[in-house]
Image (tube, rainbow, N blue to C red):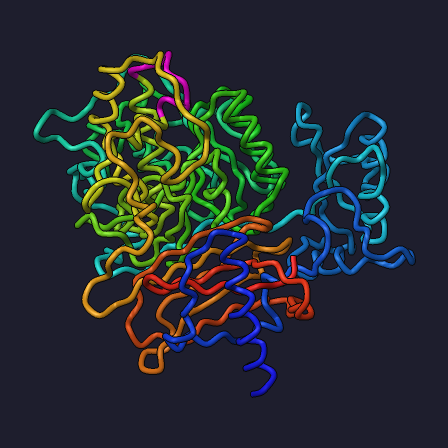
Amino acid sequence: DRESTYLSQYLLRRSFKSNKEHNVYPALKLLHYGMKFLSLSTSALAAALLAGVTHAGFPDEGDGKVSRRLARMLEKGAIRNSDGTVSVLVRYKDEEGHAVADSLDRDGHGHVISERSRVEVINANVEDIENLAKNPHIEMVELDQEVHALPNMRANDVDADKGRRRLQDVEETPYGINMVNPNSPTPRLQQGENSIKICVVDTGYDNGHEDLPTLVVENDGYSPYGDDELWNEDGHGHGSHCAGTIGAIGGNNVGVTSVNPISEKFSFFIGKGLRNSGSGTTAGVMEAVQKCVDAGAKVVSMSLGGGGFSQLVYDQYEEHYNIDGVLIIAAAGNGGNSGYSYPASYKYVMSVAAVDSNRNRASFSQFNDQVEIAAPGVAVKSTLPGDQYASWSGTSMACPHVAGVAALVWSHFPDCSNKQIREALIATAEHPGAGGCDNEYGYGIVNAKAAHDYLLNRGCDFSVGETLGGCNQCVECTSAPTSSPTAFPGCPGNEKYFKLELKTDNWGSETSWKVTSPTSGEVTAGGGYQSSTTYTEKRCIQSDACTFEISDSYGDGKLIELNSFVYMYKLFLNSFAYVSVCIT
């Protein structure tokens, strides 16, 4: 229509000016390719929204009512208790703030998650949360969120034997063990003499399983959910399956072996971050991780996800990584898209993608610029409660392979830091393609012996670069990352190159986009973004793809008047660029 035509012409004229000011590509001719822009009136990049998600204060209304921002947060997934209270994470500045938070808890006191970080969880009335966030003695308030075990995925070669007991008295070596610690051309890497404590934060642990180490109930685990959710019981099976990949007992002619088959040469600590149902809370996971670190764990394995970016969680993992020297490893996610799953996408966490027995990326494995390494995650056989065994699929199954290898390598080099172990793992990972690093595999499939030999040659006195995560993490790797190609690389056949440079607003998780074709429908898409962050998406798309849609799920993104634009995303097709300009 006339209005949209005028807008397109105006934006195109403005983009020549933007080219001079922002040094973008000179020929802005994307419209010539028939790329059509829809839903700009609800663009998630139009950031006429409210202040940051997690900082103290909900300042958009002053009439004593629940603010729009808080109402929005409550609507998006607050954990409400049966008595109407809401679970809230609080970081207090001082003891006065601590007392204020406690006074608003339904029981008169909160539950401390970390004394060092001054973080606790309280159950408060909705009307009290507003005032708590504005209190000058409170640094930050976040609503608690639900997290969950990443689901067992269907895949072509999944062995559908869930819960089947093994009857033969022959121990099996799952293919994943041979892939991450091959026995050829050199002998398999054996465990070192230095015991490393590995923490599995999941649905619990089937203590007493015939093929799992027996742990001490009083010392070797913790549950934040009370006596009805014991850490040494696993009503779901997810946690026991992950633990089996890390440390099922080898050489006992029972069940399966593992990455660390000699139980005397490593130790487990179990943090029951998830209930027997498979779900839990951000607060529960945070506390489980804290207890792992307090118990001396050096490696934390988390095959879980849920909720969006949390500043409080980010800060906790940063402390564990930089102060406590802990290596945290998490599953990249099973969405099969480029969305960011947390905790895997925090830069202080190694994000693990899944591959199948042919070393191909699993179709469900999420791909983004925080994916750092890959491991077997399709039809992985491991332990289940009740002396059972099953083959499950998911990035949940890939994660413990990497965690197990990290502990295995570390057992030979106890003087190395968590950062050096991380670098050794990614510097020696085997990429199934041309090498380097990409969003699907990270640096490639973890290899225990190669990582061991890397440290054997270098020792533990080398420096590492800034912590960035993903393909930007390793500064000592021998090949350059392939995740940053030249400006407009060639695509196979008649496909064309698509690049999107995106800056999200204060509600990044509401941002989504897709490109469609008149013949095939959706050809590529993105979503699940972090707030106030810049992203670059790069794809090869079929030649007739011609419609780009970007939207805001809440519906309040909007375009301002045509007199004060600032560009918020740039689109490129082949050697041409188009600048779209939206409110900041």
The reply to whether residue 381 is visible in this rendering is yes
Magenta stretch: dominant secondary structure: loop
- Which residue appears at 52% of the width and 52% of the height? 22
Q: Is residue 384 left or right of residue 557?
A: left
Badge count = 0
Q: Quadrant of residue 505?
A: bottom right
The reply to whether residue 217 is visible in this rendering is no
Q: Quadrant of residue 519?
A: bottom left
Q: Position of residue 575 (x, y in %)?
A: 33, 61
Q: Position of residue 414 (x, y in %)?
A: 36, 13
* Residue 543 on the magenta segment: no
Q: Looking at the rendering, in which quadrant would you find the C terminus?
A: bottom right
Q: Position of residue 147 (x, y in %)?
A: 55, 49
Q: Position of residue 224 (x, y in %)?
A: 61, 36
Residue placed most toward the observer, 553 or 169: 553
Extreme residue in the right direction: 63
- Against 391, residue 425 (above or below) is above
Residue placed most toward the observer, 493 or 222: 493
Q: Give, as a single range, the part of the protein colored magenta.
A: 412-421
- Which residue appears at 42% of the width and 62% of the height? 577
- Against 339, residue 144 (above or below) is above
Q: Looking at the rendering, in which quadrant would you find the N terminus?
A: bottom right
Residue placed most toward the observer, 346 or 217: 346
Extreme residue in the left direction: 185
* Residue 416 on the magenta segment: yes
- Which residue appears at 30% of the width and 30% of the height? 425
- Which residue appears at 81% of the width and 48% of the height? 129
- Against 566, residue 203 (above or below) is above
Residue placed most toward the observer, 490 or 163: 490
